[in-house]
Image: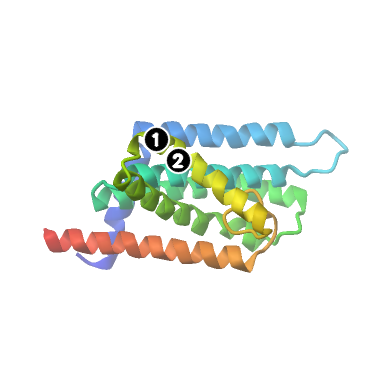
């Protein structure tokens, strides 16, 4: 199988995964939540427009939570399923990008557009990889039954650590608001590690076949 046909197959499976009932329900809730935030934060006539700040923060938190949750749920499934779900979760970032870009143009935030528009993508993949690791760890520690509680707990713990240390690494509330070299490097590094993990799983599966 060539690399191009391999990616085509992955994208096809991702589209099929995105049409699954569970994924469609989560995606609908995700977009509805962003619409709700936009509606309540859109200013009245004459007021300054700061809707982007709330939308960007809500989008990042929801993307991180969805990626963590799906990563944890898929951690012990076959490699093809993990790759398809990773690509489908990345579509959450793609489909929600118009909310971010439209409100950015109206709010004129200090964070540059390349940062605001680009950061959600490696962040989503990074949190999916963290979810895969969390699911493996929870199963090994026989804590699989409380995995639905561990997913938000890990996100809250990351935010708490950032606040205590005064840095922006795992805090999706602060990440989109200002450029952070540490945050960018960590997210890109974790996203790259996730890609390597998924690719190696694919190679192992092909070798076994």
- At 27% across and 64% down in the image, what residue appears? 200
Residue closer to the observer: 16 or 86: 86
- Which x, y percent locates residue 56? 64, 47
Q: Circle 1 is placed at which residue position?
A: 146
User: Furthest residue to the front?
Assistant: 141
Q: Residues within 10 Å of mark 1 (few under 14, many from 20)?
A: few
Horizontally, residue 76 falls left or right of residue 49, namely left
- At 77% across and 44% down in the image, what residue appears? 50
- Which x, y percent locates residue 86? 38, 51
Q: Is residue 11 visible?
A: yes
Horizontally, residue 89 falls left or right of residue 32, namely left
Residue 152 versus residue 110 in the image, above or below = above
**Residue 195 figure quarter:** bottom left
- Which x, y percent locates residue 32? 56, 32
Residue 151 versus residue 80 in the image, above or below = above
Q: Circle 2 is placed at which residue position?
A: 150
User: Furthest residue to the right?
Assistant: 46
Q: Distance between the Cα atoms at labels 1 and 2?
A: 6 Å
Q: Are marks 1 and 2 in contact (CB under 8 Å)?
A: yes
How many numbered marks, from 0 up?
Answer: 2
Horizontally, residue 185 falls left or right of residue 197, namely right
Q: Residues within 10 Å of mark 2 (few under 14, many from 20)?
A: many
Residue closer to the observer: 2 or 55: 55
Q: Secondary structure at mark 1?
A: helix
Q: Quadrant of the C terminus?
A: bottom left
- At 43% across and 47% down in the image, what residue appears? 89
């Amino acid at each position: 199988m060539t690399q191009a046909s391999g990616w085509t197959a992955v994208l096809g499976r991702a589209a099929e995964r995105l049409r699954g009932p569970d994924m469609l329900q989560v995606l609908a809730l995700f977009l509805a939540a962003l619409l709700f935030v936009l509606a309540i934060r859109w200013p009245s006539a004459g007021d300054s427009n700061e809707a982007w700040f709330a939308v960007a923060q809500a989008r990042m938190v929801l993307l991180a939570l969805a990626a963590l949750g799906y990563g944890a749920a898929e951690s012990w499934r076959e490699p093809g399923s993990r790759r398809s779900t990773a690509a489908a979760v990345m579509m959450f970032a793609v489909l929600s990008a118009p909310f971010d870009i439209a409100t950015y143009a109206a709010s004129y935030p200090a964070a540059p557009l390349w940062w605001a528009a680009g950061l959600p993508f490696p962040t989503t993949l990074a949190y999916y990889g963290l979810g895969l690791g969390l699911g493996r760890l929870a199963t090994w520690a026989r804590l699989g039954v409380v995995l639905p509680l561990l997913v938000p707990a890990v996100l809250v713990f990351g935010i708490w650590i950032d606040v205590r240390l005064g840095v922006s690494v795992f805090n999706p509330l602060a990440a989109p608001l200002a450029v952070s070299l540490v945050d960018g490097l960590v997210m890109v590094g974790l996203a790259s590690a996730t890609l390597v993990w998924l690719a190696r799983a694919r190679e192992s599966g092909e070798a076994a076949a």
